[in-house]
Amino acid sequence: MSDLADIAPSGALAQAGARPSIRPKGASVAAQVLPWLAAAAILVAAPLVFTSGTALTMMSLMGIMVVFSLSYNMLLGQTGLLSFGHAVYYGLGAFFTVHAMNLVASLRLPVPLPLMPVVGGLAGLAFGILFGAISTRRAGTVFAMISLGIAELVSSGSHILHSFFGGEEGITANRTKMLRVFDLSFGPQIQVYYLIAAWCLICAVAMYAITRTPLGRLCNAVRENPERVEFLGYEPQAIRITAFCLSAMFAGVAGALAAINFEIANSAYLGVHQSGVVLLATFIGGIGTFVGPVVGAVVVTLLQVSLSDLTEVWQLYFGILFIAIVMFAPGGIAGLALMHGPLIRAGTAHRLLPAYLLALGPFLLLLAGAIALIEMAFRVLVKASDGTEMSLVGIPFDAAHLLPWIIAGAMAVGGGLALRAVLPRMNAAWHDASDAAKETLA
């Protein structure tokens, strides 16, 4: 596919003597505010559409993961720091929040539950300063290894310091014992959802605002060329530690929201698995855009909840999806969607539809065959003690027989070959739509 960076509505401005039009300030402000108003409206209306308890729980988890993923993207996407231990600040924020909730409840302090995420944020910030002073001295692989070492250190310490971390059982709290505001007990899940949604929106706006500041631009510069930043008179390590601390602070807020939602904090919050989940969400959504981690958080949470009910090897599918995104769509899901923006504005995106529809059939065939092979292999190699009789999409069969393997293998291979044969047509359609968009926008 061709690079759409050349497609821009600036062709007319390239003429000699042409001057860019100045948009009214009010229009610019409206363009910046409207997306956030739309996001707020979606957050308010979502429980009115999805009213089940499962849906409320899932949307609450999505809100927590959105804050966590955006905080991680401040490191990886904005500053270029790959961390394997971001869950440290998430987990510590959760533990400090639970202890604060218990302290407020026992002393009957006039502190309402909606302020508890501030405790998590401050805890994340404090430990971000502590660990960031060490880890941000270097970037690249060294930083990644230091972050992994810190994660293992804190995770191991959580099993030793029982008085604070509570051992394997963790520390529990009761959110209904806090000071009530507007007679809200935060017992019903709907009230907890709106609390998480409010903090999610606040944090998202704050993190987006940071990306628009000179600090945000310097973070991008450090990511691209730290030597040039130093040549310009800025200290890359100071920029990295600032971004690191802010990222840890918002991760602490996400951990506090998780503690409020589950009313418990345990060592799993601090583990490498939690750091891996946020890394997957950020990469799958796309680290190249601000909206990418939001998309990734929603997709990963949805898949976690739904796939875990359908298959025991759902984590394997996550790994395959991650590999596929890294190999074939480095910009993530959001990057794939935003690639079509210029074509949609130019009115040429419809030229891609026939090629996409032609590729849909082979892709689904490949996907179905691969899923069947994975599930049968898991049944035969891992769950053989339960018998080889199984069913997929309501079709019963015996995985010990050769015929199901032949059919699944033929589907996977046939779908892959057919998809490969369709790719030239997809590329041709993309070039055609891109060239037409360039002519339209010129």
Image: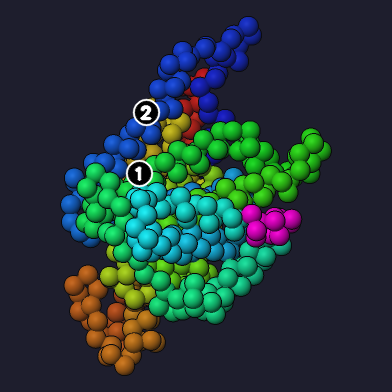
> What secondary structure is marked by label 1?
helix
Give x and y (percent) for residue 389: 24, 86
Query: Of discs 2 and 1, which sits in the foreground?
Result: 1
Q: Nearer the viewer, residue 320 or 78?
A: 78
Image position of 24 with respect to 428: above or below: above
Kindly identify the amino acid type of the residue bearing the numbered disc 1.
Ala
Whether residue 135 appears in magenta in the rendering, the answer is yes
- CB-based contact (under 8 Å), mark 2 and mark 1: no
Give x and y (percent) for residue 100: 43, 60
Q: Is residue 67 left or right of residue 384?
A: right
Kindly identify the amino acid type of the residue bearing the numbered disc 2.
Leu
Mark 2: give few (<14), some (14-19) or many (20+) Cα within 10 Å.
Answer: few
Image position of 403 with respect to 100: above or below: below
Q: Nearer the viewer, residue 253 or 299?
A: 253
Query: Taking the image as drawn, is residue 130 in sight?
Result: yes
Label for residue 198? 1
Q: Residue at x 55, y 38 (%)?
A: 210
Residue 43: name its quadrant: top left
Write the start and end of the magenta stretch as one range: 129-139
> What secondary structure is marked by label 2?
helix
* N-term-proximal mark, 2 vs 1: 2
Residue 419: name its quadrant: bottom left
Mark 1: give few (<14), some (14-19) or many (20+) Cα within 10 Å.
Answer: some
Q: Residue at x 79, y 41 (%)?
A: 230
Label for residue 310? none
Give x and y (percent) for residue 161: 53, 77
Q: Residue at x 41, y 53 (%)?
A: 116
Label for residue 34? 2
Q: Looking at this view, name the residue that lies furthest to the right.
A: 231
Q: Is residue 190 left or right of residue 330?
A: left
Mark-to-mark CA distance, 2 and 1: 17 Å
